[in-house]
Amino acid sequence: MEPIKQRITNYWSVRAEGFMQQRVREFKNEKRARWLAEIRRFIPEGRHLRVLDVGTGTGFFALIMAAEGHEAVGIDLTPDMIARAKETAELLDVPAEFYVMDAEQPAFSPESFDVILTRNLTWTLPHLKTAYRAWYKLLAPGGVLINFDADYCRALDSDDETELPENHAHKLVDPALISENEAITMEVGAYQMPRPQWDVQLLVEAGFERVTIDMGVFRRIYAEIDEFYNPTPIFTIAAYK
């Protein structure tokens, strides 16, 4: 494993337990309906879909899609995250499959999925071009990649002073872990160009025929400053095969 990927895996191994607890609360919160509404903007209605949640963490997207009756699979590089995803699936009694797997090199057959979902993952990938090309191959014709992310590597330079609630994850994380996250962010940022403009270029090069950007999702998902609030404005990229 590359040193940067090992470093990321080590970081999220420490965060896995607390991350799972927050994602369970988010699943039971109105945020779940908001995320579903955003996803439904880009997927066909009335169809049973094969869904891959890349960088699933503790399984949030895979589980909300499985709860809607779709066939959902989640993958993550961090074994502790996948262990927590399986635990969460049992806790919520939602059927989904989870595997430890590198997002840049997913081991599935071509055209295995109708939808690929990812949330706050692509900013951590040192080889984003490789990932987009691999995901294109995994999509069935007419399939869609839906990527929720932000330009976190450049957000470190911003002066956002939003006051976060005391139960927010950012306030509960050990300062040493926060410093490690910032160090990882800067290291990965050396590989990346300004986003989402760069993503559009890479997606077109990978073969995607239609790519759309939505910069308004941040306001719809994070209308309140609560424990789930993301202080960095996220965007949605939808890319169709």
Image (cartoon, rainbow, N blue to C red):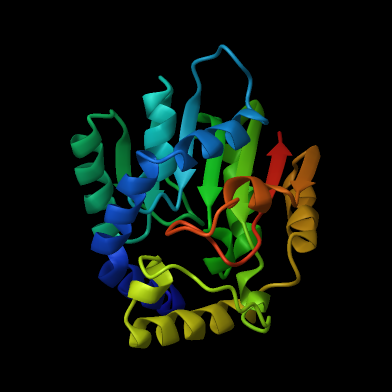
Residue 238's x, y, as percent? 70, 41
Q: Is residue 40 left or right of residue 50?
A: right
Closer to the camera in the image, 209 or 118: 118
Residue 127's x, y, as percent? 59, 66
Residue 134's x, y, as percent? 58, 48
In which quarter of the view is residue 230 placed? bottom right
Q: Residue at x 42, y 59 (%)?
A: 227
Mark yes or no: residue 110 visible.
Answer: no
Q: Residue at x 77, y 62 (%)?
A: 198
In which quarter of the view is residue 166 placed? bottom left
In the image, residue 185 above or below residue 69: below
In which quarter of the view is residue 239 placed? top right
Tag count = 0
In the image, residue 206 above or below residue 152: above
Closer to the camera in the image, 120 or 32: 32
Q: Residue at x 39, y 75 (%)?
A: 171
Q: Is residue 187 left or right of residue 169?
A: right
In the rendered view of the protein, which quadrant contains the C terminus?
top right
In the image, residue 54 above or below residue 168: above
Mark yes or no: residue 117 visible.
Answer: yes
Closer to the camera in the image, 93 or 239: 93
In the rendered view of the protein, which quadrant contains the N terminus?
bottom left
Q: Is residue 72 left or right of residue 237?
A: left
Q: Residue at x 34, y 68 (%)?
A: 12
In the image, residue 99 above or below residue 194: above
Residue 52's x, y, as percent? 47, 38
